[in-house]
Amino acid sequence: PHSRNYCVTIPFAFQENEIKLLTAEIERLKNFGCLGVSPSLEGLRDENSKLKYRLNFLQKSLQEERSKAAKSMININSCLQEIFGAAIQAAYPELENPPLVVTPSQQPKFGDYQCNSAMAISQILLKTKEQKVSPREIAEKIAKNIPANECIEKVEIAGPGFINVHLRKDFVSKQLSSLLVNGVQPPAIGKRKKVVVDFSSPNIAKEMHVGHLRSTIIGESMCRLFEFAGYDVLRLNHLGDWGTQFGMLIAHLQDKFPDYLTVSPPIGDLQAFYKESKRRFDTEEEFKKRAYQCVVLLQSKNPDFIKAWELICDVSRKEFQKIYNCLDITVIERGESFYHEMMKDIVKEFEDKGFVQVDDGRKIVFVPGFPVPLTIMKSDGGYTYDTSDLAALKHRLCEEKGDILIYVVDSGQSVHLQTVFAAGQMIGWYDPKVTRVAHAAFGVVLGEDKKKFKTRSGDTVRLIDLLEEGLKRAMDKLKDKERDKVVLTAEELKAAQTSVAFGCIKYADLSHNRLNDYVFSFDKMLDDRGNTAAYLLYAFTRIRAIARLANIDEQMLRKAAREEVLILDHEKEWKLGKCILRFPEILQKILEDLLLHTLCDYLYELATTFTEFYDNCYCVEKDRQSGECRIVKVNMWRLLLCEATAAVMAKGFDILGIKPVQRM
């Protein structure tokens, strides 16, 4: 039920009509996306041989899919939903799309999961069938129709109609063993899709500031999640690298560095360079006229002006890359200039389909449901952000063939983006039932005064300054703990500093619901208590050290994972085992709602659940009375639980873009 495989049952002797039917079935499977394209069949002369060849290829493809599915971590919640969905269907076949609610139980006395569908079904029966049936009676009928399965030990009816589900311990133990043998694997996702993620998107000639922090961190993490889940991900940086502002920048470049065509201009501070050109543009009429002329020459692809534009872009790129290197960001540059040649066709397409109106010389498009129209051409014949965003949308849908498009852009752009998406839908570029186009909006970063995060002088905080301050504070914190004196070597101290500094900045952002504003505080994010990266990184290094201090190496752990049965008799072992196995359902939820703070909350829950387990269950028993602290017993199944916890935490950190260290 989890692998979504399809197979064809065939006889060994093929009749002519069977050959036609089976060939058609193989083509259908190929078109449906269940079967890859087979190698060339040249050299196979008769239809029987060709069909056998195709069927062998089909069998091999299905075996590969089954192998992949066997290694995938089972989403227990989804598994239970399938079971209860079948039970409800059997109990009430007359209901169409009955409500299906399965959630983890909040208290152990209510089992491990709960199915809470009975109350909603009771209301539906009353409204649609005029049948008054108590939720408890419905719950009992559902429970009687639960099909045979490998994961449920027993169910109990509680209260007005809650179905409490108790999982089988051997099932949980088997899943944990699979995780240890195969590694942390993504849940099965079905057909592989292409995901295009638009994130970061700073403007050329302006330094990245704290406002770019959220888009960059959230976008990177989303890409990592979709990549881990098996999607084909295209990471795009929609740079602001085109437009009228380049006229004033090029004019200023010509004045300040007249030999820029032969000698590379030493622009040290591009932000200051931008401010100088903007001041001149606002105060010098002659300069302003020349700036407009420069824009015309740039857009007409004059080689000298293209060279000037490239020089300015290159200076910015180098500065952006410093930030991306610090934060371990991978993104492909595809700025507004990439779409410039497509904009003429965009305008023509909207005109040809009768969507364009002319308003005071402007060409505008009204989209149903949105009061403000899109301006796709200005009265002077120039294009706008609306035009470039429409061109980008079409290219991602029609050229890149994106199945899922995600725009990681601040909430202030919400109406604009929704209008652009609706325009693309209106003109027929995509069907929202088939293609997902989503705006992953986020709030602003606030200072501790709850106002927009600024420097003391009121300027926007430069992102590079923020990262350098993070490094300084992380080192101060490590030295306060005296990690530099006896615990860590100089190399380990440097690695810990980088891990803590950048990990804490990322986690502080990602651990908040992206839809809300959040307060940036170094003191809070570097606190090693509570839901912070500092706490989780320290917890991770402690877990990794348990086996090492017991003199158990990786080879011994791998051997034990294949041979040892994980005993889950202690309540804390059981609680930890179930928590570990919730990882796939957490990821599935985020793939649907794009809210990464759920992963942070889960990792914190996992770490605190592990602490409960470790405080109550001895992994390594020592002879403390002799004074030697000699190891007398190693409880290997508990060490394996430690290893499974660390493996899931490591994968969670990787998705969040956080690099843990072995020693801290």
Image: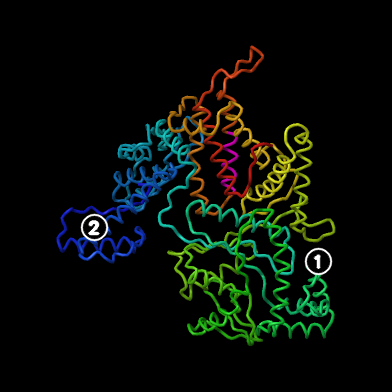
Query: What type is the residue that disc 1 sits on?
Result: Gly
Q: Quadrant of residue 290?
A: bottom right
Residue 344 versus residue 505 in the image, above or below: below
Disc number at residue 52? 2
Query: Do labels 1 and 2 touch, CB within 8 Å?
Result: no
Whole-percent x, y for residue 262 in the image:
77, 78
Q: Nearer the viewer, residue 416 or 157?
A: 416
- Which residue is located at x 43 percent, y 52 percent? 189
Whole-percent x, y for residue 68 in the image:
40, 48
Disc number at residue 268? 1
Separation (CA) of disc 1 from disc 2: 68 Å
The local secondary structure at tag 1 comes to loop
Residue 103 versus residue 173 in the image, above or below: below
Q: Main secondary structure of the magenta part?
A: helix
- Which residue is located at x 37 percent, y 50 percent? 64
Q: Quadrant of residue 166?
A: top left
Whole-percent x, y for residue 276 in the image:
83, 73
- Which residue is located at x 77 percent, y 36 percent? 484
Query: What type is the residue that disc 2 sits on?
Result: Lys
Disc number at residue 592? none
Q: Nearer the viewer, mark 1 or mark 2?
A: 2
> Which quarter shows the C terminus?
top right
For the record, the magenta segment spans 597-608
N-terminal-most mark, 1 or 2: 2
Whole-percent x, y for residue 341 in the image:
58, 80
The local secondary structure at tag 2 comes to helix
Asked if residue 18 lies left or right of residue 39, the reply is: left
